[in-house]
Image (cartoon, rainbow, N blue to C red):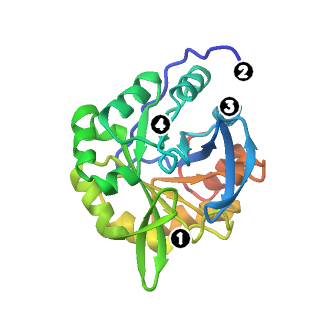
Amino acid sequence: MDQINTQIKSTPFRGRGGLSKRIIPCLDVKEGRTVKGVNFVDLRDAGDPVELAWNYSRQGADELVFLDITATVERRKTMVELVKSVARQINIPFTIGGGINEIADADALLNAGADKISINSAAVRNPALIDELAKAFGVQFVVIAVDTRSIGNKNIVHLNGGRLPTERETLEWILEAESRGAGEILLTSMDHDGTKNGFDNGLLKIVNDAVHIPVIASGGAGAVQHFVDVFEKTNVDAALAASVFHYGEILIPDLKAVLKSNNIEVRI
C-alpha cells in the first residue's frame, strides 16, 4: 500500500441521467481514525482511513467520502495531511468534508488532492458560501451534505454532526443549495443512520424528484437488498454506506454483482 499510485483518476463528477449508479464507502474520521456509530453517537473504531481507502479502491468502489465529524464542533480544520496521504494511494475520486468555512479551506484541500469538498454546517449558517465556492471552483466540486431528522411531521436540517436542530426544512434547504450552485447533495437520514434497517426511501424519492443534480443516499444500509431498494424506489445517483463496508459485512464486488443481476447498471 505504500507504493504511490500514479494512475489518472476517473472524472469526479457525473450529471443526472448517467447510466451507472455509484457505490460510495464513507469514512467518518475522528482524530485520524475511522469511526462509526448509531444515530450519530456511540462511536467505535473502524480502522485506519488511508488503509481503508486503498482497500476500497481495489474492491471497486466508485468514489469515497471522508468526513471529519468533529472538525466543525471542535473549531478545527480538516487535516490536509490525510488528504495528501489518501491521494497518493488511490485512483478513484474522493470528497472531503468537515470544518470547511471559507474559500481558503476548500482551496487547501483541493490542492492537497481531494476531488470534491463537502460542506454542511457552514453552508446553512452562510448560504452565500455555496455561491462563492461554485464560482471559485465550479459546481462539480461542491457537495452539500445535509443531515436530516424527522421532527413532528417535518424533516429538519441538523448541524454540527447532527447535534443541533435548525429551523430549516430539508427539501426547502436542498432546493436553495441547488439554486446557489451545489453540484451534488449528500443526504443523510439521522433516523436511519447506523440502524441497518434500510435507507429513507420516502424522503430520498421526494428530494431526488425535486432536484436536477445528483443525490447520494446515506443512512441505514444494512443489507445488499437495501441498495437494490434505494436505486429501484428512488432512482438516486449513488448510495453511501459505512459500517457494512468497514466491518466486511458487505463486499463491494458482491454488492455490484447483485445490483447488476437486478438490472441496475453499475461499473464493474
Q: Position of residue 62 (x, y in %)?
A: 55, 39
Give yes or no for contact between labels 1 and 2 (Cβ–Cβ under 8 Å). Answer: no
* Crowd tier of the residue under label 4, counting other residues whose Cα lies within 10 Å: few below 14, some 14–19, many 20 or above: some
Q: Disc 3 versus disc 4: distance between alpha carbons?
A: 29 Å
In the rendered image, which residue does mark 2 sit on? Answer: 1
Can you tell which of label 1 and label 3 is closer to the viewer? 1
Q: Disc 1 versus disc 2: distance between alpha carbons?
A: 36 Å
Q: Amino acid at mark 2?
A: Met
Q: Position of residue 160 (x, y in %)?
A: 48, 56
Q: Disc 1 versus disc 4: distance between alpha carbons?
A: 31 Å
Q: Residue furthest right?
A: 248
Can you tell which of label 4 and label 2 is closer to the viewer? 4
Q: Amino acid at mark 3?
A: Arg
Q: Is residue 214 visible?
A: no
Q: Is residue 257 above or below residue 112?
A: below
Q: Residue furthest front?
A: 74
Earlier along the polypeptide chain: callout 1 or callout 3?
A: 3
Earlier along the polypeptide chain: callout 3 or callout 2?
A: 2
In the rendered image, which residue does mark 4 sit on? Answer: 77
Q: Amino acid at mark 4?
A: Lys
Q: Residue at x 49, y 25 (%)?
A: 9
* Crowd tier of the residue under label 2, counting other residues whose Cα lies within 10 Å: few below 14, some 14–19, many 20 or above: few
In the rendered image, which residue does mark 1 sit on? Answer: 200
Earlier along the polypeptide chain: callout 4 or callout 2?
A: 2
Earlier along the polypeptide chain: callout 1 or callout 2?
A: 2
Q: Is residue 221 visible?
A: yes
Q: Amino acid at mark 1?
A: Asp
